[in-house]
Amino acid sequence: MLGSYAITSTEFGILNQLRRIPFFASISDEALAQLAAQCSILQVNAAHLVFSEGDVGDALYVILDGEIQIIQNFESDVLQLSTMRSGEFFGEMALFDDAPRSASARALNACVLLEIRKLAFHALMQSYPHLVSDTLRILSARLRETNAHRLGDLHRRNQELQDANRRLQKNYGATLDALSAALDLRDQATQGHSQRVTAYTLLIADALNVPADEYEALRLGALLHDIGKIGVPDAILRKTTSLTPAEWTIMRKHPEWGAALVEKIDFLRGARDIVIAHHEKFDGSGYPYGLRGEAIPLSARIFAVADVFDAVTTFRPYREPMSPHDAVGMIRAQANTNFDPQVIAAFEYAFPQMLQVLRASFVV
């Protein structure tokens, strides 16, 4: 007997458990005994889900022994929000609304739980109104903890994504460098041609005040400008004598072949303007489309000057290199024919730095 209320041995065991939990410390023995009569003891195995995200809840659970982990699905992964231990309770959101559970509760080990139904807890709160504020206070603290976990997890995921993106970009860069070097060797160009002409292109672009967000497209285009030559047979590409008209017809297809390759790959599409138009000339006499003046993309007009400068100042099997200063005069003389005069002016401004790049590769 407890006062005028008779309890069973099971209820007496539950009552003793409840007395040890701080949340119920202010509740009279009689009220706790009445609550115990309406509760159930659950034996839960490790890894068992007490409830799942999306379930409609009508009870909270007091942990008498063991540990419970609160988890939540997030995209394709699972967030671990908090861990509850003996003497704590969980699932209290179900006391205040009929909405689906916003998280899941999973046993980390064998647990003993006390299940308190909503109606029983509501009856207790009517007798002890302070339990409402106490429950809300605990709920608020848990929400803050949950948000901290989410923010921490999002920060971690964001960092992992940034690290993965950096590794991916590094791998892309290494692949592109290797591909451009292979193209240089296949075309019998001087070693390092693509790297130098890329550096020259960016220096000229800087002198023209090209926006920084366009530099990646310039870099990719310069590295891959001749990627279409993959489709040109070695007998034509490596020929040391003049090409026949039929061979020239094939050779002049390489800008279109290259553009068709890069535009199929998302991160290479910015290279297309240089790949397709690097043999166009300012007076319209170039190929493949005979574009004239500013109809030629600016990136291709810049690259054309950089490419010719590197071509004439480095050794080829069929001729000796021109001096850098003579190359400047030759390019200047082709203003308004092969090259854009404004690009030539920027080239001359950038020439001292370009000369440093050249000298880093060769003794001039």
Image (cartoon, helix red, strand yellow):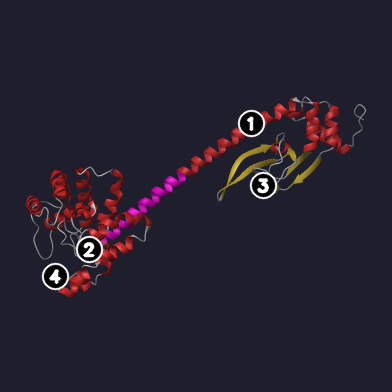
Q: Which residue position holds label 3?
A: 54
Earlier residue among tags 4 and 3 = 3
Residue 315 in percent (x, y) is at: 12, 59
Circle 2 SS class: loop
Please tell me how crowded label 1 is: few (under 14), some (14-19), or many (20+) other residues with Cα within 10 Å. few
Instruction: Residue 303 in the image: state x and y as whole percent.
Output: 21, 54
Residue bearing the label numbered 4: 240
Residue carrying label 2: 289
**The N terminus appears in which quarter of the rendering?**
top right
- In this rendered view, identify the residue nearer to me: 184 or 262: 262
Q: Nearer the viewer, mark 4 or mark 3?
A: 3
> In this view of the protein, can residue 90 be seen by the observer?
no
Of residues 305 and 223, which is closer to you in this image?
Answer: 305
Residue 111 location, x and y as percent?
73, 43
At label 2, the amino acid type is Tyr
Badge 3 density bin: few <14, some 14–19, many ≥20, Cα 10 Å: few
For the residues labelled 2 and 4, the Cα–Cα distance comes to: 27 Å
**Which of pointers 2 and 4 lies earlier in the amino acid sequence?**
4
